[in-house]
Amino acid sequence: MHTPKRRLLSPSSAIPMGLCLALASLTLQAAEIFVSPDPAGQNQPIKTALASAAEGEVLVLKPGIYRETLVIGKRVTLKGEPGAALDGTIPLPADWQPAGAELPGVLTAPLPSQPAGLLLDGRFIAELRFDRAQKSGDWHWKMLLQKGPPLSGFNEIKALWIWHPGERRAYLRLPAGISPSTARLTMVAQDRPLIAVKGASGVVIENLELIGGSTAVSIGEGADRTVVRGCHIRSYEDTGIGLSGGASQCIVENCEITRGALEEWAPSMEHSRSNYEIWRIHKDVGKYDRVGINLFRAGVGNQILHNRLDRVFDGICLGDYKAESLDDPLPDAAHGRGTLIAGNVIENTRDSGIELGVGCVEVEVKDNTLRRTHGGFRFKVPRIGPVFIHHNRLIDGAPFNFWFSMDSSPAEGYIYHNTVVGRKPALALHVEKGKRDFSVPRWHFLNNLFAVKEGYLDKPDKGNTVDFTSAHNVCLRQDASPWPGDATKDKGSRYGLPLTLNDQGAPAPDSAAVDAGMDLSTYWKGKPLPGAEKGTYKGAAPDVGAAEVQ
């Protein structure tokens, strides 16, 4: 049976369009509403179409720029044709003048309300927060606007701005040689998502380009089974895609996400304190993290699959900033339960590649590639478990790869069949001072390949207990056992062996990694660890690392 299609909606003919929508809404089984942008930017054609769309209908966005923010509260599909983009930026109406002798090189302009972000040529300028940049000295907001961070000046950060709440004006430091009269300055006027889904299940958002939102897509309360697929988030100020409010069984897949910052967000692989000041600007005196995909108090059964994240602050986070110490109560053990994070590529993060916290009950993280991440996998006090982390590749992480931080983790956790390549140690146990001796007694490191020059375990902080379980790992460095001289605590692990990998990171047929693992098909309470079932290896024993030689 042929499904009727809606006619093209043109914002230039408001009355016929309204009549068309009213009549078409009566048509049973109508599948698609075609929407075109308004070149003048005066109308909001997507909102108009949403208001009239019936449950289950598809809004097809024709190519062009849509300057709207949307709240989706019914089960519809929002689908973009190639070239369809939502853009949350608008021109910045400001009369910039020199800020005076106290702030040489700084511009100022009255702004009655605080923008959610400022952009130069479509890239976000680093923002200082007035309430966080009051400490006297090099990191006071006035000093930062004049000179930049003390070690790097404006070589790394490029530009800064701040909104003064008492004066209700903005202060701006542009890159050298750029005048406000010629600069293309825009802003995100309001702190709201480009697309917010709440109170409706089964919403689908696909094949859209999302530009310059505070958050690109927010999936909130009552938005179960939302799907975000094939979207390209080119810039955002706060969060790329956020899941919260108990949203469950949602899927985020095949999306490309980048922060869109003016400064270069690829971290230095060397120990560069000046480059690190980019991190400090945001973390110490700015707006904190800028997460690519953030599951904050999300519900159960969410899946984050085959996305590519590049030049973001944190890549994918499952956690709650109010539960990052054992002294803090866990808000809800069900938050994030059954989350699957698989097949993602995360590169060039200013902070962690993947962060895991809260209950971490039945969470599985597999087949991801983390490349040039500042923090690799960071564990922020997972409480319960089980959490299964397997068949991931960590390449050139610095300064950390697997990293326990903040406090001890009592969770049941399994880290197995991962490959770590580069210089820095595979595992770090560094926690905040003044809490308690560190302990992770229910964590297991099994069948991992550590092709890193500095070995398995970074030197733990004083007082930390090295009490995890380890077996059948293979390590490039000779003197790298977490328990020097005590082989009973690291059964079957081998150190100081040449490790030959091919271009895909798989062991060569003659590698020491071949057949060096242990059978994990009954390791977890007599059951297989996920991804280590019978038949998953070909030789006499599993190969260690993320790839089995075929």
Image: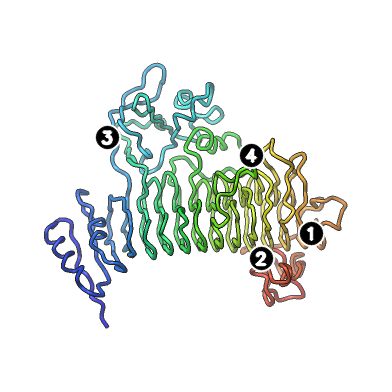
Please say if 95 is above or below 416.
Answer: above
Q: Position of residue 523 (x, y in %)?
A: 73, 68
Q: What residue type is labelled 1?
A: Leu
> Label 2 belongs to which residue?
506
Q: How crowded is mark 1: few (under 14 residues within 10 Å), some or many (20 or more)?
A: some
> Label 1 belongs to which residue?
497
Of labels 2 and 3, earlier in sequence is 3
Q: What residue type is labelled 4?
A: His
> Label 4 belongs to which residue?
271
- Which secondary structure, mark 4? loop
- Contact flag, marks 1 and 4 (Cβ < 8 Å): no
Q: Where is residue 404 in the image (x, y as percent from the top left)?
A: 67, 48
- Which secondary structure, mark 3? loop
Instruction: Give me the residue at 34% from left, 64% from top.
Output: 75
Of labels 1 and 4, earlier in sequence is 4
Q: Position of residue 412 (x, y in %)?
A: 68, 58
- Which secondary structure, mark 1? loop
